[in-house]
């Protein structure tokens, strides 16, 4: 229970910190997510993006700007929370347990608190890393689809360009989150953990 | 539907709960319109996916 609470607390702090960073960041500050996203979009669409100071990554050929609001930070925040929640019970995988005692007689020694905190950080780090990769990938797919829809405006009739863009965002982001959850449920955490001998 | 509950909760949390907590309601009808679409569209997606899965299951049993 302590480990699970620890993971969720760390995850909430990470989500809050990321949201604060996003609120105050300029396009330059978000290079760590905008740069790989623009490169991936460039690969998918065979378009070249160049950095425009204060704005983001621009394709002059397609007149398309990947700016701060296209960074996919909200997706990443949702993914961190979801993965930390989904993997919260995996903290036990990393915490060495004393063997040979009944569960009711097991005490949490002083060093165990550090082990739980360390295990929580490892689960959180895995959640953040997976969320980052997912955010870049899903966001690149969303931007590629947006560019394609912008080039083919007559494909969806009866809806304005803004409505199509919004629906496309919901489908790709929610679909990406669901896919990420399905993958996370299949991820094998069976890392061998060396439990110390109980004396 | 049960499998979609966790991603759905976190999606709603970030797209609706966080803006609401930041006072998005004070921006007027624009947020309400956005909120209705954000609330309904994922449910339509989940319902469609459930129907496709059910149809696939029935077709496989035949």
Image: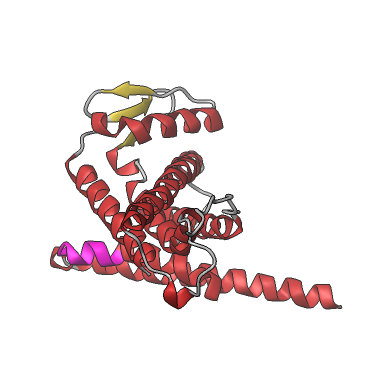
Q: Is residue A39 above or below residue A175?
A: above
Residue sitting nearer the eye, A63 or A179:
A179
Q: Residue at left 31%, top 57%?
A: A110
- Image coordinates for residue A8, horizontal then vertical, percent: 34, 61
> A92 or A126, which is in the foreground?
A92
Can see residue A63? no
Residue at coordinates 44% horizontally, 77% vertically from top-left?
Answer: A104
Tell which of B43 and A88 is nearer to you: A88
Can residue A39 be seen from the camera position used here? yes
In the drawing, does residue A81 fall left or right of residue A194? left
The image quadrant that residue A59 belongs to is top left
Is residue B20 one of those drawn in magenta?
Answer: yes
The x, y position of residue B57, in whole percent, is 75, 74
Q: What's the colour scheme?
A: secondary structure
Query: In the displayed structure, would residue A102 be above or below residue A54?
Result: below
* The residue stretch that appears in magenta: B16-23
The correct choice, above or below, for A197 with respect to B7 in the image is above
Classify the position of the N terminus of chain A by image quarter.
Answer: bottom left
Left or right: A12 as drawn, with respect to A79: left
Left or right: A103 as drawn, with respect to A60: right
Residue at the (80%, 74%) spot, across then down? B59
Question: Which residue is situated farthest in the front direction here?
Answer: A199
Q: Total number of numbered labels?
A: 0
Residue A114 place in picture, x, y as percent: 33, 52
Q: Nearer the viewer, residue A113 or A167?
A: A113
A169 drawn magenta: no
Dominant SS type (magenta): helix
Quarter where residue A79 is shown: bottom left
């Amino acid at each position: 229970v302590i480990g699970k609470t620890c993971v969720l607390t760390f995850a909430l702090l990470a989500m809050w910190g990321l949201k604060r960073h996003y609120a105050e960041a300029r396009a330059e500050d978000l290079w760590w997510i905008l740069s790989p996203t623009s490169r991936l979009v460039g690969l998918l669409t065979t378009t070249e993006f160049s950095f425009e100071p204060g704005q983001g990554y621009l394709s002059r050929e397609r007149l398309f700007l990947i700016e701060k609001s296209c960074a996919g930070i909200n997706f990443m925040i949702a993914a961190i929370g979801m993965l930390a929640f989904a993997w919260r019970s995996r903290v036990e995988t990393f915490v060495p347990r004393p063997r040979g005692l009944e569960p009711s007689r097991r005490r949490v020694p002083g060093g165990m608190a550090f082990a739980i905190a360390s295990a929580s950080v490892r689960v959180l780090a895995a959640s953040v890393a997976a969320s980052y990769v997912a955010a870049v990938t899903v966001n690149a797919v969303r931007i590629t689809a947006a560019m394609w829809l912008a080039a083919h405006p007559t494909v969806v009739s009866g809806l304005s360009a803004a409505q199509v863009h919004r629906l496309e965002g919901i489908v790709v982001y929610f679909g990406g989150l669901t896919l990420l959850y399905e993958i996370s449920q299949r991820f094998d955490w069976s890392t061998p953990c060396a439990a110390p001998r109980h004396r | 539907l049960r499998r979609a509950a966790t991603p759905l909760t976190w999606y709603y949390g970030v797209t609706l709960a966080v803006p609401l907590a930041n006072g998005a309601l004070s921006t007027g009808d624009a947020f309400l319109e956005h909120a209705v679409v954000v609330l309904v569209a994922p449910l339509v997606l989940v319902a469609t996916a459930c129907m496709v899965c059910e149809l696939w299951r029935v077709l496989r049993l035949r």
